[in-house]
Image: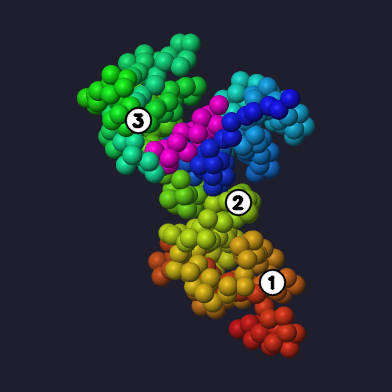
């Protein structure tokens, strides 16, 4: 007997796979729009743990895996790695040792529900934008839980234009465990159902203070602070948020995070259509000091990426992982406020340069050494003579 299963929307899968990684001790450490740019699990302080959890979420999203199977597959991996139950852990922000909850069935359920629902929501928002000329209205569907939140329930059945500002702050999901959704409609559908376009509700705001940063903000009622961001951010948010986080952590953790980022879909998309800045490397504190840099994160500009594609079209996207390998394992050659990293064994050269103020470091060149041994030796000698 054949079993028919609905396929997950490709936009939801693409949204989830474009994310990088961010490590946070508390849920407030990775904040609001950063969730559009990066995958995180509070207190999963190692990249390999995040990779394991993310792989399970990805499979659940693309294969339609139910939570029972998700938990059955993931729990033994987390138990084996010691990320289960309660444990003492140092808060990297304060240095305080705290007894914290790591993995649990309840936490896995939250991870599963939140990531799948936000991915589907972001994917739906992309489809809404693509189809809003033909289907210009959205209807709020807010009574899908056994005990729906009263404020969400009050919006049930409301119809507003897809461009109404209300959706920028209230496009579901906006709370942990929220099962609200929207339906996209056109005028004929509204008429058949006897529906009319509603007046947008005036939603009061409440003050909220992020206990980790001290940031004070106003959050609309019915929206959890962690979800207080507009839909559709995706890759536009990734470089800035990831770069800020890389600058805030130590070099070893930043480099580990970066390696995972460069192997993911986010860099592949940047490589195919460069726009803005993208973190491409992490230099040591000593190297940063040598060129007067106040940051250890190396940025790649869209202009440089475009130049790379023109001048070095032979370099495949996966080869850009050697930028960081050259920084870590190569011979370091200083040339004023630039550093040249020669990875002789693998045959790559990375050049980074700090700005005049030292506030940013950019990769200015990345290339593969010639396969011709004579030319290769000549180039290595020229670099070493610097």
Q: Which residues are magenta?
A: 113-128
Q: Is residue 289 left or right of residue 140?
A: right
Image point 54% across, 41% down: which residue? 10
Image point 52% across, 61% down: which residue? 272
Q: Position of residue 365 (x, y in %)?
A: 54, 73
Mark 2 and mark 3: Cα distance apart in space: 35 Å
260 falls in the magenta region: no
Q: Earlier in the sequence, mark 3 or mark 1?
A: 3
Residue assigned mark 2: 264
Mark 2 Cα-neighbour bin, 10 Å: few <14, some 14–19, many ≥20 = some
Residue 98, can we see it?
A: no
Quarter of the image where the C terminus is located: bottom right
Mark 3 and mark 1: Cα distance apart in space: 57 Å
Asked where in the image residue 16 lies, by quadrant, the reply is top right
Quarter of the image where the N terminus is located: top right
Q: Position of residue 195 (x, y in %)?
A: 28, 21
120 falls in the magenta region: yes
Q: Earlier in the sequence, mark 1 or mark 2?
A: 2
In this view, the mark in front (1 or 2): 2
Residue 226, can we see it?
A: yes
Residue assigned mark 3: 185
Image point 39% across, 28% down: which residue? 183
In this view, the mark in front (3 or 1): 3
Residue assigned mark 1: 343
Mark 3 lies on a secondary structure that is: strand
Which residue is situated farthest in the top direction here? 147
Mark 3 Cα-neighbour bin, 10 Å: few <14, some 14–19, many ≥20 = many
């Amino acid at each position: 007997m054949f079993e028919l299963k609905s396929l997950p929307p490709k936009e939801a899968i693409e949204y989830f796979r474009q994310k990088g990684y961010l490590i946070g001790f508390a849920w407030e450490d990775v904040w609001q729009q950063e969730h559009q740019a990066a995958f995180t699990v509070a207190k999963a302080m190692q990249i390999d743990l995040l990779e394991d959890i993310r792989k399970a979420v990805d499979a659940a999203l693309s294969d339609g895996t139910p939570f029972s199977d998700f938990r059955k597959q993931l729990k033994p991996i987390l138990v084996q790695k010691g990320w289960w139950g309660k444990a003492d852990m140092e808060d990297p922000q304060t240095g305080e040792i705290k007894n914290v909850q790591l993995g649990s069935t309840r936490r896995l359920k939250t991870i599963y529900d939140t990531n799948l629902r936000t991915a589907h929501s972001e994917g739906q928002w992309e489809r809404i934008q693509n189809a809003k000329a033909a289907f210009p209205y959205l209807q709020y569907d807010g009574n899908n839980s056994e005990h729906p939140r009263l404020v969400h329930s009050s919006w049930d059945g409301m119809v507003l234009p897809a461009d109404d500002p209300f959706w920028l702050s209230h496009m579901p999901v906006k709370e942990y465990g929220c099962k609200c959704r929207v339906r996209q409609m056109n005028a004929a559908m509204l008429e058949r159902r006897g529906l009319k376009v509603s007046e947008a509700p005036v939603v009061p705001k409440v003050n909220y203070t992020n206990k980790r940063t001290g940031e004070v903000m106003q959050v609309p009622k019915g929206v959890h602070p962690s979800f207080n961001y507009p839909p559709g951010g995706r890759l536009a948010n990734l470089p800035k948020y990831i770069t800020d986080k890389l600058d805030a952590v130590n070099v070893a953790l930043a480099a580990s995070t970066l390696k995972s980022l460069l192997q993911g879909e986010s860099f592949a998309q940047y490589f195919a259509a460069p726009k803005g800045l993208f973190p491409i490397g992490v230099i040591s504190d000593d190297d940063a000091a040598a060129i007067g840099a106040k940051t250890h994160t190396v940025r790649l500009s869209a202009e440089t990426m475009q130049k790379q594609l023109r001048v070095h079209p032979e370099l495949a996207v996966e080869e850009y992982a050697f930028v960081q390998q050259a920084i870590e394992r190569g011979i370091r050659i200083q040339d004023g406020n630039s550093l040249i990293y020669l990875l002789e064994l693998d045959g790559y050269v990375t050049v980074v340069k700090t700005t005049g103020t030292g506030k940013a470091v950019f990769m200015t060149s990345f290339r593969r050494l010639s396969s011709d041994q004579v030319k290769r030796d000549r180039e290595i000698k020229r670099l070493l003579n610097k």
